[in-house]
Image (cartoon, rainbow, N blue to C red):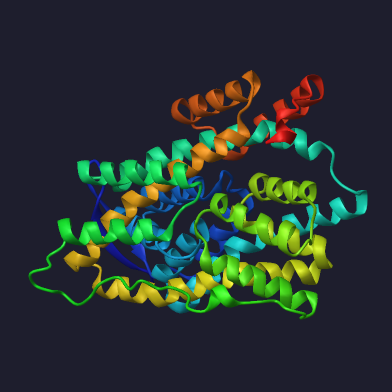
Amino acid sequence: MAEEQDQPTPGGMNRRSRRGGPLGETALYFLRLGALGFGGPVALCGQMERDLVQERGWLTQDEMRDAIAVSQTLPGPLAIQVGIFIGHLRGGFWGAWVGGAAFILPNFLIVCAIAALYVRLGGLGWMTAVFYGVSPAVIALILHSCWRLAKLGMRDALQGVIAAVCCVLTITLRAEVALLFIAAGLIGVGVYGNLVRRARATLPAIVPVGLGALKAGHLPILPQLFLFFLKAGSLTFGSGLVIVPFLEKGVVQQNGWLDGRAFLFAVAVGMLSPGPVVITATFVGFLVAGFPGALAATIGMFLPSFVFVLVVAPLLVRHRQNPNLQGFIKGAYAAAIGTILGACVLLAKIAIGDAVTVFIAMAALAALFTTKLANPVIVGAAAVVGLVAFPLLHPNWVYLK
């Protein structure tokens, strides 16, 4: 039987927090999230917070906040890491593998099917039209989820300052920088922690040593794909929005596996399909080497997330009340909010370029704040608008950006 604890709700009443649930229950939830969850990492984290904290009571608000903050400080895709972390809290070592694999599987199969159609039909001309309509709706999903996550974990003015600085730096540098999270965490330790006691349980900074030197060389194509995406999953921090420039440089410029247009479709598929945005790796792998290539790229991309979370999660569970650890998490959480907002600004420059896309973004944002429409409904409506408007308007800026 699952262990239950009384936890206070936002309204002050106690509810039951269910821990140690069966693996099948965890797998079913993440299969559903992987098949129906849209909007990128922030939207997916917001949906997990709503489903698992507010509705099901699987986690407390503090546990959800810790999962997001710690995952944001590690290399790799944020949403998957949060899912693995939650799986670990629910079912230990095997819960982490079951939750993470169930989260990835639906999206992997969907993207493989789209890639197969793309190869067979010689490209999907309607994809650009869908991308035109859905991209501004994705901006709205990210902004709404950032607001929800800020309500969950932002507690004071210092966190607001950290978030603002990280947002500006992200926009200026056009990338998320791992050092921002470490620096913000150290500020949190100094302000919120208790350095006088010199508590030794602190969050370890896990840096993949030597991965920067990985070279595919003249290996067969499958090991090349695996090593390239292993490096991508190990050295890029935050969301799929951050990993796109890294992939474009390696896939298009260095290795020449795809041309620019095919890579654009790969990014579009990653954004438009449910689940984690970095499933772009699966599409690229399929175009380069068929289903075996998709499998090699996917394993390479997501394997580091399992390793990193399984190393850190037990430490956090054991020492989560340590003031220095909590201070690090508060600072890193604020940095996460700021850098994701900065990435959202950068993405908006690509997604919004005329009156129609402005309207889609504003309408989607209004729907998210004033209605209970599910994310797939909003994304579907935006896709329909794109399919209708794009052939009529022929917006050339979509190709230029």
Question: Which residue is outermost to the right?
Answer: 121
**Position above or below: 160 against 262:** above
Quarter that holds the C terminus: top right
- Residue found 46% across the figure and 42% down from its top: 171
Q: Nearer the viewer, residue 107 or 5?
A: 107
Question: Which residue is outermost to the left?
Answer: 196
| Count of number-bearing discs | 0
- Residue found 77% across the figure and 29% down from its top: 387
Residue 335: % across, % down: 35, 51
**Position above or below: 176 against 344:** below
Q: Taking 362 as reference, is 14 left or right?
A: left
Q: Nearer the viewer, residue 216 or 62?
A: 216
Q: Quadrant of residue 6?
A: bottom left
Q: Taking 301 as reference, is 224 left or right?
A: right
Residue 79: % across, % down: 50, 56
- Residue found 21% across the figure and 41% down from its top: 157
Residue 255: % across, % down: 75, 65
